[in-house]
Image (cartoon, rainbow, N blue to C red):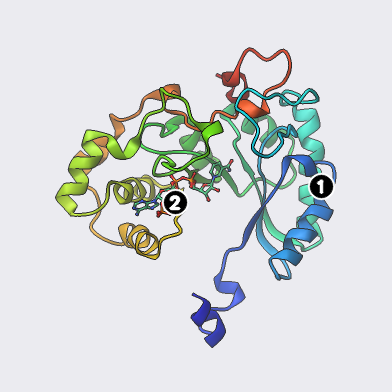
Amino acid sequence: MKKCIEAGTVTRKDLIVISKLANQHHGCVEKACRKSIKDLKCDYLDIYMIHWPVPNTHPPGCTVDSLDPTAIPFSIDVYIKVWRQMEDLVKKGLVKHIAVSNMTVKKMKALLKVCKIKPVANEFEMHPCFPQEALKNYCIKNDIVPIGYCPVGSPNRPARDRTDEDLVDIDEPVIKRIAERLGIHPATVCVKWAAQRGTIPIPMSANQRNILANLDSICSEPLTAKEMKEIKGCDKGAKGRLIKGQVFMWVGSKGWPDLWDE
Ligand SMILES: NC(=O)c1ccc[n+]([C@@H]2O[C@H](COP(=O)([O-])OP(=O)(O)OC[C@H]3O[C@@H](n4cnc5c(N)ncnc54)[C@H](OP(=O)(O)O)[C@@H]3O)[C@@H](O)[C@H]2O)c1
């Protein structure tokens, strides 16, 4: 990629540059966005995304049970103030599109009622054990791109996002069986499935071979209708959620399912 950019065969307009608004910057959106643009050495961003629906923070390296005493639950009256600042970024030409992340159907409905500019995308957790079918369908119905994080089940996520009960997508027998049939890694089966169901998976990899395998998986032989149906059977509902967001809970909440309107 670096070589293509240097040679001019890939130009800025061929790239989609996305950055996120951190929770502690909900009150100073433009300043945070301008810093991202500068840090990325761009003139504008293609998409700027609100990372979490709440402004709650946690110190780096904190334990899973640490709680921000100033944390608050989601409120559309609070969120819309952040969204209005996001809309101003579009008007000022700093960003082409604005987006959300970790939003549920309930929160999306509240936002769509009051926004002037619609979010172009919602980035949320999706993988075979946790496909979030209803949320995905809601986004597609409303012309909002569903972007799936942890698409291969985030095998190396931080300890604060792990519990003993967590499921491992790449160990699911059906995923392993399909991987054997196609002679590919189970992780790439998850990526293939995600793209084939109309979502945009964002697998993270620091390994060139895996990056290329992930790209190849969306262009090569598709999964059969039978395989797509079999993978649907991996859905474990709320039990499949890996990123529970415990560190964003507020005093008085009943537990992390509150964050997800469960
Ligand atoms: N919006 C949010 O709140 C939110 C929350 C969580 C995550 N995310 C984002 O979502 C992206 C993905 O999440 P994630 O990294 O947690 O989970 P993930 O993409 O499901 O898992 C990444 C892991 O899978 C391995 N992997 C990737 N492709 C592979 C392949 N083809 N074969 C074998 N192993 C493979 C990687 O190892 P190698 O490096 O060795 O390939 C890496 O350890 C990240 O960019 C993350 O920042 C967003």
Viewer-side residue, 208 vs 110:
208
Label 2 lies in ligand 1 vicinity (Cβ under 8 Å):
yes
Rendering quarter of residue 80: top right
Q: Quadrant of the C terminus?
A: top right
223 is higher (above) or lower (below) than 61: below
Q: Quickly name the residue at label 2.
A: 203
Q: Crowdedness of circle 2 by 10 Å Cα count: few (<14), some, many (20+)?
A: many
Rendering quarter of residue 72: top right
How many circles with numbers are drawn on the protein?
Answer: 2
Mark 1 and 2 residues: CB-CB less than 8 Å, in contact?
Answer: no
147 is higher (above) or lower (below) than 229: below
Label 1 lies in ligand 1 vicinity (Cβ under 8 Å):
no
Amino acid type at circle 1 is: Gln
Circle 2 — which element? loop
N-terminal label among 1 and 2: 1
Q: Residue at x 72, y 12 (%)?
A: 252
Q: Which residue is drawn at 72% across and 64% down?
A: 39
Q: Which residue is drawn at 62% across and 29% down?
A: 63
Relative image position of residue 5 (x, y in whole percent): 55, 80
159 is higher (above) or lower (below) than 100: above
Amino acid type at circle 2 is: Pro
Q: Is residue 57 left or right of residue 196?
A: right
Relative image position of residue 91 (x, y in whole percent): 80, 58
Q: Residue at x 42, y 23 (%)?
A: 164
Q: Nearer the viewer, mark 1 or mark 2?
A: 2
Residue 85 - label: 1
Q: Crowdedness of circle 1 by 10 Å Cα count: few (<14), some, many (20+)?
A: some
Distance between the Cα atoms at labels 1 and 2?
30 Å
Relative image position of residue 34 (x, y in whole percent): 79, 60
Relative image position of residue 240 (x, y in whole percent): 41, 27
